[in-house]
Amino acid sequence: MSKKIHIRLASQRVNTSVAVNQRYPKIFTPGQEITSHNEFMRGHGTYEEDTVLKASVAGVREQVNNLISVRPLKSRYNGDIGDVVVGRITEVQQKKMENSVLLLSSVNLPGGELRRRSVEDEHMMRQFLQEGDLISAEVQSVYSDGSLSLHTRSLRYGKLSQGVLVTVFPSLIKRSKTHFHNLPVGASIILGNNGLIWICPTINKVEEGVGGFVQNLEEVIPRQERETIGRITKLCISFSTE
């Protein structure tokens, strides 16, 4: 017995988060004609066929002077200098820790001590960070192959302790002046530009001043704070799927 299947076009799904001037933008689908005028230049997310400019991805049209591009609604994260990211250490190598790339010289020493890194620090690297540790960091530079160089020199960056990690599309996280927020409901949140959101109990000033190496996993989080973290987690997941 055959069943009717209803498939919606991308043009029928309007993402309100990319609205400009309170108007809903038009969503272009792959292969859809953007313009047939020859005075426009082809940008990212477009291609030219028979003198007609068409979209190669599903997204919103953006125009700068005569340059037309299509910004995809969902895409992989492309790092930029100054971005705040949340990630997990996957490998510890000599003088560096693999996340993207986090060099020992770019890591705060315990207590926020400022001095040159020595051979002893290199040997004790695993006492700073280990495989599986979650960290918050800032993008210091971008290599030619797209990989990122990170640093945790500021005391607000470093190892993350107890909390919940939520993954959303990176396009949902907007770049802003601060990505660290202490919410009045009794929780803290870190909005990573790479689409990873960290929700944890409220971070106090004492934890901020120890160089980002406090990870007390034996501390018992009160039930009220755990419920608050759970509610915020559900809200982030709900907002990311709408």
Image (cartoon, rainbow, N blue to C red):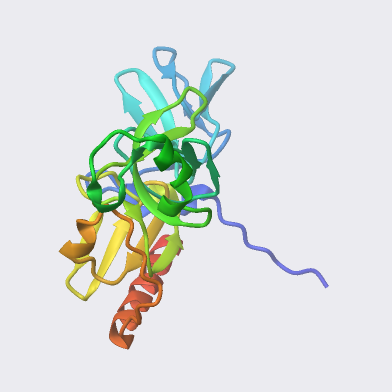
Which residue appears at 41% of the width and 28% of the height?
142
The image shows residue 75 at horizontal and vertical percentages of 49, 42
Residue extending farthest to the right is: 1
Q: Nearer the viewer, residue 156 or 39?
A: 156
Q: Is residue 226 above or below residue 102?
A: below
Question: Where is the N terminus found, in terms of image quarters?
Answer: bottom right
The image shows residue 187 at horizontal and vertical percentages of 26, 71
Q: Can residue 242 be seen in this view?
A: no
Q: Which of 173 and 63 is in front in this view?
A: 173
Which residue appears at 54% of the width and 15% of the height?
51
Residue extending farthest to the bottom is: 223
Residue 239 horizontal side relative to residue 110, left or right: right
* Quarter where residue 185 is shown: bottom left
* Quarter where residue 196 is shown: bottom left
The total of numbered circles placed on residues is: 0
Q: Which of 97 and 223 is in front in this view?
A: 97
Which residue appears at 29% of the width and 62% of the height?
189
Q: Is residue 5 above or below residue 115?
A: below
The image shows residue 19 at horizontal and vertical percentages of 30, 48
The image shows residue 161 at horizontal and vertical percentages of 37, 65
Q: Is residue 239 above or below residue 103?
A: below
Q: Nearer the viewer, residue 240 or 132?
A: 132
Q: Is residue 126 visible?
A: yes
Which residue appears at 33% of the width and 72% of the height?
232
Question: Where is the C terminus found, in terms of image quarters?
Answer: bottom left
Residue extending farthest to the top is: 39
Q: Is residue 147 above or below residue 213?
A: above
